Image: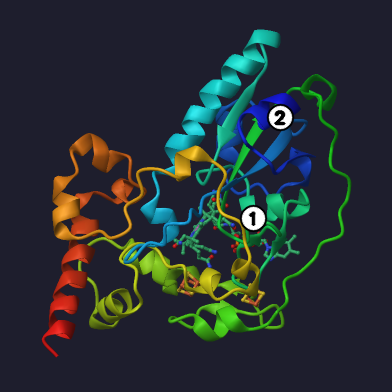
Amino acid sequence: MKKFFKDNNIEFYSLIPLSKCKVVKKYLLDKNGFSDNASVIMMLFPYRSKIKPINLTVYASVKDYHDYVSELEIKLQNYIKSKYPSALFKVFADHSPIDEVHAACISGLGFIGDNGLLINEKYSSFVFLGECITNLTPEELGLDYTGDIEIKTCLHCGKCKNACPCGCIMSRDEMPSGIKQKECLSAITQKKGELTSEEIELITKNGSIWGCDICQNVCPYTVNASFTPIEYFQGDIISCLDINTLSSLSSEEFKKRPFAWRGHETILRNVNLYEKYMKEECNG
Ligand code: B12
Ligand code: SF4
Ligand code: SF4
């Protein structure tokens, strides 16, 4: 497996037993035939390139990471099945049986910031998380389980909490800690249907029509963070999404974008809101 990761530019990975993870969607384990004895290879995929998007978040400006993960799964399948034809394994990202931030943290791949995200020392929080769950043993995988690691925390500098436009970051000394997901601007940009005037104002005034990067951009760990070495995230970046760019996308091209899963109408509504706001700003 080490050779596979090297060949695919995957720098941060770690093996842990599934029994150590917080299972949040058990049906995904059952559906794929995994027992409690399975193992999890957690992986980080850095995705921030040198191109800084203008009205999108970094994750919305690059090609959809779900497609990247599907391609990786096919490569992994060929690799593993050539040696272990009856091996059981599946790659998940996002729609996952486990709490991925927690799993990456206990795997030693980073620590959890007060903004609720996994922060890696080299790439900061601009890393997608994914995992391969398998019934292969550590010996068969050629990897060792990561032992108990010392859980680090972030600086608790308060910058993310102060900058959050929705006031939804709770620091660790508040209960409950973490973020209030319904109020997070990232969730608001993804809401279908009509928005309230407060929600419209939040979307137009905070610089992104899909997702929100504010608590990541202000984080001190982001200042000297490295850019992605993964080619998939370096090309075909949309840095500014306006009506012309959106309407020029063929349906095949549209499907490759991270905002496609919500349908055309939701992103079109946000683009229209943004353009209207920019026009009003220019007219004084
Ligand atoms: C639902 C969801 C959202 C929701 C709610 C987010 C939230 N934080 O609750 C919305 C739409 C708002 C959202 C937004 C974003 N998301 Co999101 N989201 C998810 C998803 C699908 C599930 C999260 C969840 O509900 N987990 C379960 C609950 C129980 O966890 P929780 O309440 O957050 O807290 C747990 C952990 O944080 C952990 N924990 C907390 N503190 C500590 C401390 C220690 C010491 C330990 C060990 C554990 C621990 O334990 C808690 C309880 O289990 C995950 C993928 C996944 N399957 O995990 C992606 C995921 C968390 N999102 C991701 C991303 C990229 C984002 C955005 C940055 C996108 C954007 N640019 O707009 C924003 C960031 C918002 C933010 N500050 O969190 C990435 C995060 C990558 C990273 N570096 O951490 C994930 C992992 C997807 C992926 N596969 O890469 N997201
Ligand atoms: S993503 Fe934006 S709204 Fe959500 S917690 Fe971070 S700063 Fe706040
Ligand atoms: S901005 Fe400060 S408090 Fe927030 S996650 Fe980064 S180091 Fe932690």
The part of the image, by quadrant, that contains residue 76 is top right
Whether residue 124 is situated above or below residue 146 in the rendered picture: below
Q: Give the percent coordinates (x, y) of residue 117.
A: 60, 63
Residue 20 placement, left or right of 63: right
Q: Give the percent coordinates (x, y) of residue 199.
A: 30, 77
SS under mark 1: helix
Residue 254 placement, left or right of 210: left
Q: Which mark is residue 35?
A: 2
Residue 175 in view: yes
Q: Amino acid at mark 2?
A: Ser
Tell me: is circle 1 under 8 Å from ligand 1. Answer: yes
Q: Residue at x 55, y 49 (%)?
A: 228
Q: Residue at x 50, y 54 (%)?
A: 48
For disc 1, the neighbor class at 10 Å (few under 14, some 14 to 19, many from 20) is many
Please state the quadrant of the image where ligand 1 appears: bottom right
SS under mark 2: loop
Tell me: is circle 2 under 8 Å from ligand 1. Answer: no
Separation of marks 2 and 1 at Cα, in angstroms: 22 Å
Residue 230 placement, left or right of 142: left
Q: Which mark is residue 101?
A: 1
- The quarter of the rendered structure image containing the C terminus is bottom left
Q: Amino acid at mark 1?
A: Val
Of label 2 and label 1, which has the lower sequence position? 2
The part of the image, by quadrant, that contains residue 243 is bottom left
